[in-house]
Image (cartoon, rainbow, N blue to C red):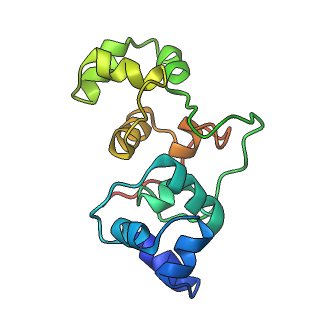
């Protein structure tokens, strides 16, 4: 994640200092920057909060660093709006599973919190629904995302 390294350097932090701030090992953090380890939602949220940026910025969906306003709904970080937004669009789990190129059962595990949704699938859903990842995760109530990167 080039943005992670970029933000860390902008803040004059070593990998060790940043890793300590988010309560993990330097080796583990280094793997995120080198793209050899997938970042968890928990760590992604910690980093977005620490740097005061939106998750879409960390994942290169936008070049706008400005965080969205905080959600009035106070939920655990593993909650998301997947079912709510799918039903608002009058779609079935099968429809979304096709978009994500996976089984309906696999997708249903995301909606029912049996499995953590991988970051790549979360990005696909944010783009499909034209919302921010922060919105999907109940971190903001702002539905419209910042201007998307077209790269």
- The image shows residue 106, relative to residue 24, as above or below, that is above
The N terminus: image quadrant: bottom left
Q: In which quarter of the image is residue 77?
A: top right
The C terminus: image quadrant: bottom left
**Is residue 146 shown to the viewer in this render?**
no
Q: Residue at x 27, y 27 (%)?
A: 99
Q: Residue at x 38, y 34 (%)?
A: 128
- Looking at the picture, tell me which residue is in the foreground, 150 or 119: 119
Residue 90 coordinates in the image, percent (x, y): 46, 11
Question: Count of labels shown?
Answer: 0
Q: Residue at x 57, y 88 (%)?
A: 12
Give the farthest residue toward the left.
101
Give the farthest residue toward the right.
72
- The image shows residue 22, relative to residue 145, as above or below, that is below
Give the left or right position of residue 23, taking residue 37 as reference: right
**Is residue 41 shown to the viewer in this render?**
yes
Give the left or right position of residue 148, taking residue 135 as reference: left
Q: Which residue is drawn at 59% across and 83% down?
A: 11
Residue 138 coordinates in the image, percent (x, y): 63, 37
- Looking at the picture, tell me which residue is in the foreground, 51 or 66: 51
Residue 53 coordinates in the image, percent (x, y): 60, 62
- The image shows residue 147, relative to residue 125, as above or below, that is below
- The image shows residue 60, relative to residue 127, as above or below, that is below
Residue 43 coordinates in the image, percent (x, y): 52, 55
- Looking at the picture, tell me which residue is in the foreground, 42 or 101: 42
């Amino acid at each position: 994640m080039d943005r992670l390294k970029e933000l860390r350097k902008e803040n004059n932090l070593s990998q060790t200092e940043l890793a300590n701030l988010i309560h993990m090992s330097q080796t583990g953090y280094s793997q995120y920057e080198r793209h050899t380890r997938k970042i968890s939602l928990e760590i992604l949220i910690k980093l977005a909060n620490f740097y005061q940026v939106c998750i879409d910025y960390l994942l290169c969906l936008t070049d706008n660093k400005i965080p969205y306003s905080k959600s009035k709904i106070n939920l655990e970080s593993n909650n998301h709006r997947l079912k709510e937004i799918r039903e608002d669009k009058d779609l079935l789990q099968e429809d979304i599973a096709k978009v994500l190129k996976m089984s309906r059962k696999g997708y249903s595990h995301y909606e029912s919190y049996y499995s953590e949704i991988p970051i790549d699938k979360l990005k696909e859903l944010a783009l499909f629904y034209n919302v921010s990842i922060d919105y999907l995760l109940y971190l903001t109530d702002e539905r419209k995302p910042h201007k998307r990167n077209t790269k």
